């Protein structure tokens, strides 16, 4: 396993060779991918959401049933946060890479920063924050959403125009099934990998399944698996190479190195 320093400029030769050689690249991204845009991760100490809010109170169907305004207030704040941030150089580098080689992105992120940078995202495994729908009849909600500038305790969710039900965010809550099309697209992308192809595992703690199992599945296909993460994750050990740097530093360096 190769572990260079954090800058992104000193990539190991094996990693540069892997990115040059790959016909296909599968990117498995997690919350760390968006961190440098200003979107908090979930599990980073101090800054991660789960360090100061309780997942059981905000990310389960039961929490929603018990107190929709309490849950909605948090998601509305996150929608507002998302409107205020921009993709960073790492997102743009992946979009650039997608113009010269076959890149598939399967993300656990519920933001749209990959898309805004110019990438097509094959799978939003945990849904999309702004993909709103009625919690009762599932009708998509396309109306306006008022967002608070600062976190608030409670906020009434929008009302469904069809049935009058509460509108919920399009994220997957703990205990819910992942969107079938996202899982299917990810599995198809993994099945298409062949020896010599590349799997980039970017900014995930590798704790939440099934996403946490995908790097091993890519490895089993014979792909070269490279992690980009400033710290060790639960999937670091099974990766061929680990680049200890941030997505915003390492990915542009990786894509630039491919061109040289
Ligand atoms: P986590 O918050 O669990 O992990 C974020 C990872 O990103 C950590 O390993 C960090 O070291 C790494 N990281 C932080 N900053 C980074 C940077 N600038 N560049 C690269 N990596 C960086 O996030 P996920 O693994 O995505 O689920 O979490 C998985 C799921 O758990 C989320 O999708 C969410 C959460 O509960 C749902 O909302 C359903």
Image: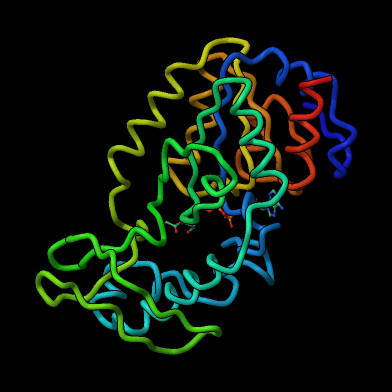
Ligand 1 lies in which image quarter?
A: bottom right
- Place residue 182 in its image quadrant: top left
Work out which quarter of the rendered image holds the C terminus and state it.
Answer: top right
Residue 174 in view: no
- Place residue 42 in its image quadrant: bottom right
Q: Where 207 sits versus 224, above or below?
A: below
* Residue 72 spot, x, y in % from top left: 36, 77
Residue 216 in view: yes
Residue 137 versus residue 162: which sits nearer the camera? 162
* Residue 45 spot, x, y in % from top left: 68, 66
* Residue 185 spot, x, y in % from top left: 37, 31
Left or right of 70, for residue 219: right
Q: Where 61 sits versus 258, above or below?
A: below
Residue 186 versus residue 20: which sits nearer the camera? 20
Identify the residue at image location x=80%, y=34%: 253
Identify the residue at image location x=48%, y=35%: 213
* Residue 254 spot, x, y in % from top left: 77, 31
- Report the coloring of the rendering: rainbow
Left or right of 86, for residue 248: right
- Place residue 195 in its image quadrant: top right
Q: Where 242 sits versus 25, above or below?
A: below
Identify the residue at image location x=65%, y=45%: 233
């Amino acid at each position: 396993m190769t572990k260079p320093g954090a800058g992104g400029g000193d990539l190991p030769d094996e990693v540069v060779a892997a990115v040059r050689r790959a016909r296909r690249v599968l990117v498995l991204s997690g919350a760390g991918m968006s961190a440098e845009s200003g979107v908090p991760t979930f599990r980073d100490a101090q800054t991660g959401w789960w360090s100061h809010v309780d997942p059981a109170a905000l990310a389960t169907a039961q929490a929603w049933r018990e107190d929709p305004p309490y849950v909605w207030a948090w998601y509305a704040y996150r929608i507002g946060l998302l409107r205020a941030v921009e993709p960073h150089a790492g997102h743009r580098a992946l979009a650039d890479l997608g113009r010269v080689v076959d890149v598939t992105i399967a993300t656990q992120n519920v933001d749209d920063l990959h898309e805004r940078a110019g990438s097509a995202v094959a799978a939003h495994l945990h849904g999309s924050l702004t993909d709103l729908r009625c919690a009762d009849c599932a009708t998509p909600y396309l109306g306006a959403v008022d967002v608070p500038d600062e976190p608030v305790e409670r906020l009434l969710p929008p009302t469904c125009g069809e049935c009058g039900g509460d509108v919920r965010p399009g994220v997957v809550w703990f205990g819910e099934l992942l969107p079938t099309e996202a899982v299917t697209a990810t599995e198809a992308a993994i099945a298409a990998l062949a020896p010599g192809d590349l799997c980039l595992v970017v900014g995930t703690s590798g704790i939440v399944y099934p996403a946490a199992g995908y790097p091993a599945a890519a490895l089993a296909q014979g792909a070269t698996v490279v992690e980009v993460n400033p710290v060790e994750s639960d999937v670091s050990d099974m990766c061929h190479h680990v680049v200890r740097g941030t997505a915003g530093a390492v990915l542009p360096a990786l894509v630039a190195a491919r061109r040289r």
